[in-house]
Image (spheres, helix red, strand yellow):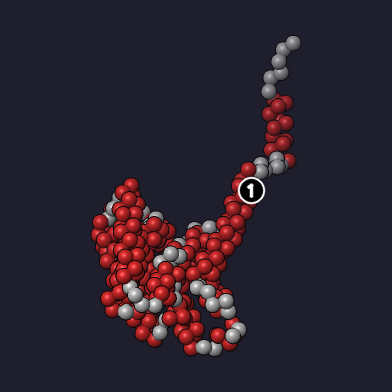
Amino acid sequence: MTTLDLLDQGFVQQALIAGAVLALLAGLLGPLVVGRGMAFAVHGTAELSFAGGAGALLLFGASAVGWGALVGAVLVALVFGALGLAAHERDSVIGVLLSFGLGLGVLFQSLYTGRSANKFGLLVGQIVGVDTGDLISLAVTGVVVIGVLGVAYRPLLFASLDPTMAAARGVPVRALAIAFAVLLGATTALGVQIVGALLVLSLLITPAAAAARLTASPLRATVLAVVFAEVAVLGGIVLSLAPGLPISPFVAGIAFVTYLICRLIGSLRTRRRTNRTLVPAAPDSTSTSSQSALASQSPRPRP
């Protein structure tokens, strides 16, 4: 079947809807993740989400994978947010939990004796397996994430860019960190289900990093991150249909190319501004005449 034939199928249309919702959430949260320096935390959350999904697959079957991944991601996100770790010790703690989650997930997968496609889908995604129940849970999660962001976006942005000043101004930095960690965990769990635990970073980090190369405005960066995430996810789904391959390499490839283009544009802009700053202004006639007058009035050296 061709790509156009597959686009008429109901499961592909459900996959496109799920991918569009996930890309919207990733684009909204991505700039905040980059601003808070939590890219590594996303990877750690994805691995614990993978462990939760694998445990649910082992105990309750394929229908419970989404909820298991959500529980695992939210639990570890709560741990990250509640600890409030300093920057110098955050990476080590995340690395410990990441390796633990990866090992636990591999153990659960090895004990599972069902279809190998279910186990493989946790690592690289299984977008064509999204059913109506998954769409409902995705929509509910999306509404909750967008609602919380709509209420707490300004203080959350303030706490992300300058937590010390935000705390001095009375912003509840710790509570916002926990709330944001839960939102990030829920979105990461959905990303694990769709693009897989291995490449969820390509959706939550790369579009936001690309947008940051083009603008310093938080609002514009968020809009661009949403656009880049939508192009990566929807384009990845469409490109993966005809060859029948997982969408994760296509999503990661499109996001990476977008980042390279944005980085090139940003570098050209920076170089152009630098050249404008370094080029000296040509002396006008007034300054030239003033310099001549001063030279004529200066005392000449005696022979």
| Residue at the outermost front position | 113
Identify whether 4 is placed above or below 224: below
From the viewer's perspective, tell me whether residue 266 is left or right of residue 57: right
Q: Residues within 10 Å of mark 1 (few under 14, many from 20)?
A: few
**Observer able to see residue 123:** yes
**Observer able to see residue 229:** no
According to the picture, the residue beneath numbered tag 1 turns out to be 276
Q: Position of residue 65 (x, y in %)?
A: 34, 76
Residue drawn 60% across the image and 58% down it? 265
Residue drawn 64% across the image and 47% down it? 275
What's the amino acid at mark 1? Arg
Placement of the N terminus among the 4 image quadrants: bottom right
From the viewer's perspective, tell me whether residue 163 is left or right of residue 191: left
Residue drawn 72% across the image and 35% down it? 289
Number of numbered labels in the structure image:
1
Placement of the C terminus among the 4 image quadrants: top right
Q: Which sits in the foreground, 228 or 280?
A: 228
The image quadrant of residue 51 is bottom left
Identify whether 266 is placed above or below 122: above
Residue drawn 27% across the image and 66% down it? 75
Q: Which sits in the foreground, 289 or 67?
A: 67
Q: Position of residue 217 (x, y in %)?
A: 48, 61
Q: Which sits in the foreground, 122 or 184?
A: 122
From the viewer's perspective, tell me whether residue 302 is left or right of residue 193: right
